[in-house]
Image (cartoon, grey):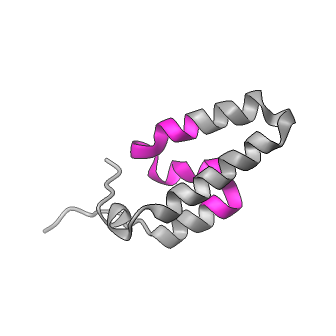
Amino acid sequence: MGEYKPKRSKSVAVILAVFFGNWSWLYTFRTDGWKFWLGLGLNIVLWWTLIVPLGVSIWAIVDQAVKPQEYYDNYFDY
């Protein structure tokens, strides 16, 4: 019997990015962990600029949207 492989979906990733911005990278943390930590650091240090948190959120949306569905199909958490 095959090993259970949790499914990931591009549409879920994009929706998470729209509503949660930087936090959407937790959905694919194994490969996007560095983006999460960089975005979180920028948001914490430069929160007062308001443009940086908006830029990080846009980056997250675009990053999740341009990845092909095959990336999410083949993503394996552990």
Q: Position of residue 62 (x, y in %)?
A: 57, 59
Residue drawn at x 63%, y 47% as measured from the top left = 22
Q: From what the image shows, is residue 69 above or below residue 77?
A: below
Point out the stretch of residues depicted in magenta: 17-37
Image position of 37 (left or right of 29): right
Q: Position of residue 28 (x, y in %)?
A: 45, 52
- Check residue 26 for magenta coloring: yes
Q: From what the image shows, is residue 2 above or below residue 44?
A: below
Q: Nearer the viewer, residue 60 or 20?
A: 60
Helix, strand or loop: magenta stretch:
helix
Q: Nearer the viewer, residue 13 or 55?
A: 55
Q: Position of residue 78 (x, y in %)?
A: 31, 47
- Check residue 38 for magenta coloring: no
The residue positioned farthest toward the top in the image shown: 45
Total numbered circles: 0
The residue positioned farthest toward the bottom in the image shown: 11
Q: Quadrant of the N terminus?
A: bottom left
Residue drawn at x 47%, y 63% as measured from the top left = 66
Q: Nearer the viewer, residue 59 or 37?
A: 59
Q: Position of residue 34 (x, y in %)?
A: 49, 36
Q: Nearer the viewer, residue 42 or 3?
A: 42
Residue drawn at x 37%, y 67% as measured from the top left = 7
The residue positioned farthest toward the right in the image shown: 48
Image position of 17 (left or right of 54): left
Kindly indicate the quadrant of the structure image that contains residue 5.
Answer: bottom left
Residue drawn at x 39%, y 44% as measured from the top left = 31
